[in-house]
Amino acid sequence: MAAFDGLPSGRLALTDAGLETVLVFHEQIDLPAFAAFPLMDSAAGRAVLLTYLSDFVRLAADRGAALVLETPTWRANPDWGDTLGYGPADLTRIQNDAVALVREAIDGQDGVWVSGCVGPRGDGYVPGDRMTADQARAYHLPQVRDLADAGAALVTSATFSYADEGVGFVAAAAEVGVPAVVGFTVEVDGRLPSGETLESAIDRVDRATAAAASWFLVNCAHPDHIAPSLGEGAWRGRIGAVRANASRLSHAELDEATELDAGVPQELAQGYAALAASLPGLRVVGGCCGTDIRHVTAIADALL
């Protein structure tokens, strides 16, 4: 599997924000299972997704920045698909439609890459029934293959909560031959929901896969929660992307929240600047829960 080398060196690229929280709290759209992908099955849903994606395309153009734009497929895997009535053939169609949707939003702009978004088998905040690395490879392989076949330039996992799922995801991407980015989330103490340290999880994935991942992502946690996980050491150079939450609430508190905690965009951007000083390999920045175009704009203003 070749590493993804499309991004320009020496300058950060952007990505998008917290799609699902934008849809739920800003657009007032009900998302069963917190899944955005079913919106692609209606003209109205596609229009909302295109508007959301196009905002980030315009921001990148305005800032002269590269952009890694994610497909709305975080929940489009077998278990969550089955919960929502989508079988294997339906999910293959969804991956194809999702890549086509992002390409439509890009509208031929240079310096923008489609990343196929892959979410965890479980909740994301709770490890639940853990898979072995081999089980995770088999589980994620169909979605990874479909996204690659549809033309995604790379695949990015988000909110993985234990290392073995990351190992299996990278193995699936290697089997398909598509570059992979492994995304882990951390709790308020900087550890994964499994209790593993971020350093240990990254090391386990790299040792098991001969460092095949293009880079690692930390997402769905506030910068104040990510910072304690960093410590010292060259391993931090493997973290190439950050997509932080706007809120300092814990995952458990966010699950119970009935109102959006969007924080202060400029304050969040300051947190990114502090993190960037400890992350020599940082390449891509964007947002996660509670963030929208305002937050990513503030991050771009602070870091680009």
Image (spheres, helix red, strand yellow):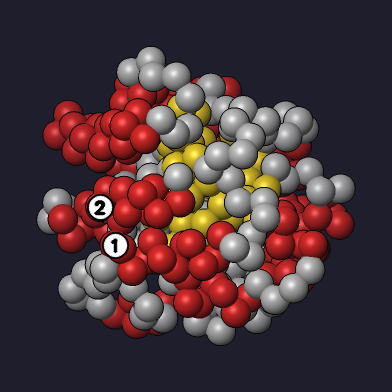
Compared across the picture, whether 206 is left or right of 304 comes to: right
Instruction: Report the residue at 36% width, 35% height from top.
Output: 63
For label 2, the residue is 294
Q: Amino acid at mark 2?
A: Arg
Q: Nearer the viewer, residue 38 or 185?
A: 185
- Quarter assignment of residue 195: bottom right
Instruction: Judge by depth and name the residue closer to the eye, 182 or 144.
Output: 182
Location of residue 91 in the rendering, given as x and y in whole percent from the top left corner: 45, 36
The percent position of residue 36, horizontal first and vertical second, equals: 31, 47
Rendered location of residue 282, percent (x, y): 60, 51
Quarter location, residue 237: bottom right
* In the depicted structure, whether residue 154 falls above or below residue 251: above
Is residue 14 visible in the rendered structure shown here? Answer: yes
Tell me which numbered mark, 1 or 2, is placed earlier along the sequence: 1
- Residue at which label 1 appears: 265
Q: Along the horizontal axis of the image, is 269 left or right of 264? A: right
Quarter the C terminus occupies: top left
**Whole-Å distance between the Cαs marked 1 and 2?**
6 Å
Secondary structure of residue under mark 1? helix
x then y, percent, for residue 287: 39, 55
For the question of whether residue 78 can be seen, the reply is no
